[in-house]
Image (tube, rainbow, N blue to C red):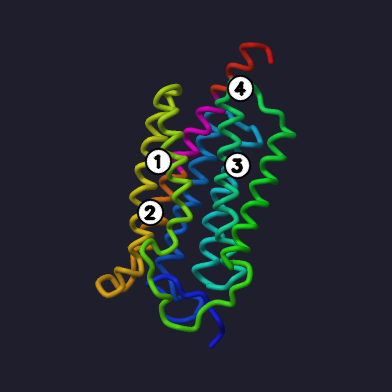
Amino acid sequence: MHDYIDIYCERINGDFWSEPLNAISNLSFIIAAFWGIYLARRKGVYAWPVWLAIILSGLIGVGSFLFHSFASSAAELSDVLPIWTFVVWYVLCCFLYLGNYKMNMKLIAILMGAGIAGMVLWLQLSGALTTNGYHHTHHPATLLNGSQQYLPAVISLYIFAFVCWRNFAKLAPSVITAALVFSVSLVFRSIDLHSCSHVPIGTHFVWHLLNGLMIALLLHSLVIAAADHYKKGAVNGT
């Protein structure tokens, strides 16, 4: 039996199709990406920062599918990197489209590089780049099952929701809903290993489904913000 990473309730061995629900549920991210494409085309938004965010949302689903299918260290990277790259890029897009000034593209590149560098450093410190996987049936459950890594993201999302509520009323409903959905999805991710004795398939697949919805909501707000940004630019002749 080859080495494999076993940190989810549904996985019972190292076979490719050992986490069918965890793997298939990643279609939610692909659907979110197509939703983003539909919205962008409908609003006439073809700016590359928006489309890069849409592509990254689809890559989240691809990477997560690979991880839940192969359960290897390399596949784990394909899962983690698109997630955090999307987070960093979405924040930069918010600066670009919601700020009171147009951010210099060189500054965006610098921040993006710093974000990726920090992400790689975190992966190295956490052992994600060096682990060879686990042989035992289930990795021991911890209180949050590793969900603590997403706490900065959920806190940031609530801050963003508050800012939208105070300053960008058009975006507030989708962003506030996204924050609430993310909170619920985080619960399902955290209880996965704790639920094995009662729910053999686990609850991690619900995390995927709800996060796909969250990404769709965030893409909706991004497209609306970009559309308004470029509309104002056209009116001002810039």
Near mark 4 (Cα within 10 A), the count class, few <14, some 14-19 or many ≥20, is some
Q: Which image quadrant: the C terminus? A: top right
Distance in Å between CA atoms under marks 3 and 1: 17 Å
Q: Disc 3 marks which amino acid? A: Trp
Q: Disc 2 marks which amino acid? A: Leu
Span colored in magenta: 216-227
- Which residue is nearer to you in this view: 118 or 106? 118
Q: Disc 4 marks which amino acid? A: Tyr
| Extreme residue toward the bottom, this view | 1
Distance in Å between CA atoms under marks 3 and 2: 21 Å
- Which residue is nearer to you in this view: 41 or 154? 154
Q: Mark 2 points at which residue?
A: 186
Foreground disc of the pair 3, 4: 3
Q: Name the residue under label 4.
A: 230
Q: In which quarter of the image is residue 107?
A: top right
Q: Name the residue under label 1.
A: 178
Q: Which residue lies at the image location 58% right of the left edge and 24% below the top edge?
A: 99
Q: Which residue lies at the image location 37% right of the left edge and 31% below the top edge?
A: 173
Distance in Å between CA atoms under marks 4 and 1: 24 Å
Foreground disc of the pair 2, 4: 2
Q: Which residue lies at the image location 38% right of the left edge and 35% below the top edge?
A: 176
Q: Do the residues labelled 3 and 4 touch (CB within 8 Å)?
A: no
Distance in Å between CA atoms under marks 3 and 4: 19 Å
Q: Name the residue under label 3.
A: 89
Query: Which secondary structure lies at badge 3?
Result: helix
Near mark 1 (Cα within 10 A), the count class, few <14, some 14-19 or many ≥20, is many
Whichever of callouts 3 and 2 sits on the residue coming sooner in the sequence is 3
Whichever of callouts 3 and 4 sits on the residue coming sooner in the sequence is 3
